[in-house]
Structure formats: structure tokens, C-alpha cells
Image (tube, helix red, strand yellow):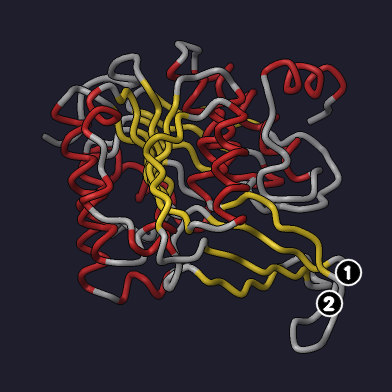
Amino acid sequence: MPNSNAVPSRPGTIVAMGEILVEIMATRVGQRFSEPGTLIGPFASGAPAIFIDQVAKLGSPCAMIGCVGDDDFGVLNVERLRGDGVDVSGIAVLKDATTGSAFVTYREDGDRDFIYNITNSASAQLSVANLRDDLLSKCGTFHVMGSSLFSFRIIEAMKRAIETVKTNGGTVSFDPNIRKEMLRIPEMRDALDFILDYTDIFLPSGHEVTLLASATSERGAIDELLKRGVKEVVVKRGAQGCSFFDANGETHRSAFKVQELDPTGAGDCFGATYISCRAQGMDVDTSLKYACASGARAVGVKGPMEGTATFAQLDTFLQSATE
């Protein structure tokens, strides 16, 4: 049952599934991991976990499906999500695995370097067995992060979850968040095409728009996606704002001017805010305004999940923000 006819299709819980990890950060710009240095953390992290935490902060009913180890890193993540209002009953605590981790350092040019322990972590053990029919049956929107598709076991679980949600009349949102080299694996390309066939709301970053289309231009790729059945395309452009496209036209918003301290998680906050606003019945313009505010506010806070915000905090930000 591919794409439905309306967005959002029905009210219900917003569910995310995928990696849950901690992030440990270098304290000095230009610091290398090839030599000793001062680090701070651990901070709760993982793209789908950041996404769902932001959803919870905005008051939307939400749940997370994933795996953590039976360790302090796992406790840190579960309690953070629980405290912010996420239903964490779908997070499995695995006795024989460790919670994923990411070490990040910031380059002089503004880019970041990461050292991940994901493929050998508890998150990598996520499978169809971890799906929760009770959570998926009441799911209004199921959110897929491309970064979570790092094993065929997880891809199988994602496919099953998507089919269940769509069969029940729910909506699928998809943030590709993928590396180009992933597309060289035929099975990975097939999996991404499968997800796109069921996607109602597509949330690519600017450079990702053409990755899953045959067209080489952004406009051509967007037209192709809309003809394929995607109902809304929201292109995240960072400091250049965002663009919205649907069958009726397009809308563009400038970004808010802020000082960037830490970009990690800003795109996840943007997407979560847009999805939450739409699920709560807000129009596109209002949803984009709050999404831009959420992303802008997030880059001004150190830590991947530390920049998630409530509507009250976003309203305060908007009162003094400039575009």
C-alpha cells in the first residue's frame, strides 16, 4: 500500500525507529583524535532519538523503537527520552551488547570528523523481533532516518514497520540522511527506493534532493518525486533556509541569523518540528516557520540533543530573531 492521498493522513502517535547512542565531543576546534585531548560528554544522541525527543518537547504523542546496552550510556538515553515525554517501552535493553557511541571533533573549516561505534553496538541488533504492533497500530506518522539503514536486518524491520503503518492509514516521513557511497550497494539502493515508494513527506538536505531521482537538477528531481507519489518535499538548506514543494506550488523561507556553535542535530530538530506541527494541524507556512526556528536555535547549543525546544522556547526565540 504505497503513498496515501493526504498529509497528514490521520492523527496518532509519531514513531521513530533506529540508532540510539551517546556522543562525546572534543572541547577545542582543530583538536585531533590522534593525540590526547580534553573531551566532554556523554550526551544523548542518534538521529532518530534526537528527532523523537524534539517531537516530545512539542507535545505530540510519540514513541521510540530501538536497542541500547545494559550500561550507563543506555540509561542516559532512555531516561532522557522518558523525561522529555517519549514512550520508551519500545526500547530494548540488551544484556550482551553495549550502547552505541560517537566521538566528534570540529575542524577549523567548520566541518566535523566522527569516530562511530554503531555497527558493533546494541543498535545494530535491531530487527523485526523488536517491532511493537501496539505502537505501530496507533502510529499516525512513522519517521525513517536513512542513517539507520546500516544493516539488512534493520532494513527488513523498517520495511515491515512501514507496511504496517501504511496499511493502518498512517503517514511515512523520510529524511534520507545518507552518504553517496551507500547508493553503490544495489541492495541499499533497492531499500531506499522501497521507502521512497511509501513516503508522504520527504525531508532531504539540499545536496540529497537528486540522490534518489534520475533527474540531475533539483527542480527536475522534485517534479519526479511528486509524480512518484510524495505529497510534500521540504528541502533543508541550513543557513540558506528551506524550500517547500507540493503539487500546488512551492514556498521558500529564509533562515534566522544565529551564531553556530554545534550543527549536530539541527536538521533532526527541523524535521521533527515540521512533522509535529503538521500532525497538530498547522498549515505549511506556520510549520516551516517553527521548523526554521527549531533548527536555528539548535545550532546555538552545544550537544546533539541539548538544543531541542518547546513551543514556548521557540516563541521566545522568534520574538527576537531576524531573518
Q: Residues within 10 Å of mark 2 (few under 14, many from 20)?
A: some
Query: In x, y percent, where is residue 278?
Result: 46, 19
x, y percent for residue 56 = 55, 26
The amino acid sitting under disc 1 is Arg
Q: Which residue is rendered at x = 49% and y = 32% of the image?
A: 244
| Residue occupying image coordinates x 63% and y 31% | 253
Q: Do the numbered discs 2 and 1 sit on residues whose CB atoms are within 8 Å?
A: yes
- Observer-nearest residue: 240 or 91? 91
Q: Which mark is residue 176?
A: none
Q: Residue furthest front?
A: 95
Residue in view at x 24 percent, y 65 percent: 152
Looking at the image, is 214 positioned above or below residue 265? below
Q: Residues within 10 Å of mark 1 (few under 14, many from 20)?
A: some
Outermost residue, left direction?
1
State which quarter of the image contains the N terminus: top left
Label of residue 31 in the image:
2
Q: Which element type, helix, strand or loop, lies under badge 2?
A: loop
Splitting the image into 4 quarters, where does residue 42 fall?
bottom right
**Residue 127 placement, left or right of 258:** left
Q: Is residue 270 left or right of residue 95?
A: right
- Looking at the picture, does residue 195 appear above or below residue 108? above
What is the CA distance from the residue labelled 2 to the residue labelled 1?
5 Å
Q: Which label belongs to residue 28?
A: 1
